[in-house]
Amino acid sequence: MPIKPEMRGFYPENWQEISRRIRFERAAGICQGCGRPHGVTVRCLPDGRWFDPARRTWRNGRGRPARWPDLVETAQMRHTRVVLAAAHLDHDPRNNRMRNLKSLCQRCHMIHDRSHHLAQRRLTYLLRRALGDLFLGPYSVCFALQMHRSAVFYSR
């Protein structure tokens, strides 16, 4: 995953080398979450199952053997190219110890960072709401109800 320009200062200068060592030397080009190989286009289903071409079987989101899809599920199949990234397990880009880094594909990385992304999304909504209070005045009843519903949805 590309590093945002405002975050580059938190990463060391040799981040590319560290990332390469984690993804290709330590993990041998395989996702440490689900077992997908780097650079391969795999068939996958919305529930996380994917077809492992090397073993000619379907695997679940954790890399374990799974049941074959039925006809309805096959209609929902899509193809995706697997790209590995070095993920920080504690979400701190300054902590580059080897035990804090893991090689994850896009799907596993997004699942790992889900709580962080939801917290950032909530902050963004609250900042927008504060700017609205500051410049637009009080919200209408419909907008306040919509904001309340989204807050309840994200607090689950």
Image: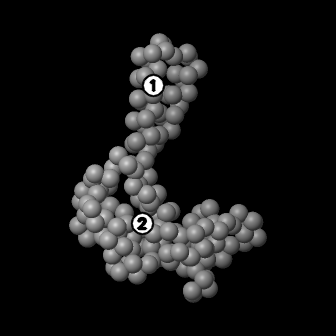
In this rendering, the label closer to the viewer, 1 or 2: 2
> Taking 39 as reference, is 114 left or right?
left
Image x and y of residue 71, in percent:
76, 70
* Residue drawn at 49 percent across, 15 percent down: 136
Per the image, the residue denoted by label 1 is 129
* Residue drawn at 55 percent across, 79 percent down: 65
Is residue 115 or residue 87 the one in the foreground?
87
**Residue 8, placed above or below residue 47:** above
Image x and y of residue 94, in percent:
24, 56
Image x and y of residue 89, in percent:
32, 61
Question: In the current view of this chain or complex, which residue is farthest to the top?
Answer: 137
Is residue 6 or residue 108 the one in the foreground?
6
> Taking 95 as reference, is 80 left or right?
right
Image x and y of residue 67, in percent:
62, 76
* Residue drawn at 49 percent across, 75 percent down: 38
Q: Which mark is residue 85?
A: 2
In the image, what residue type sits under mark 2? Ala
Residue 115 is at least partly visible in this image: no
**Residue 80, placed above or below residue 149:** below
Distance CA(mark 1)–CA(mark 2): 34 Å
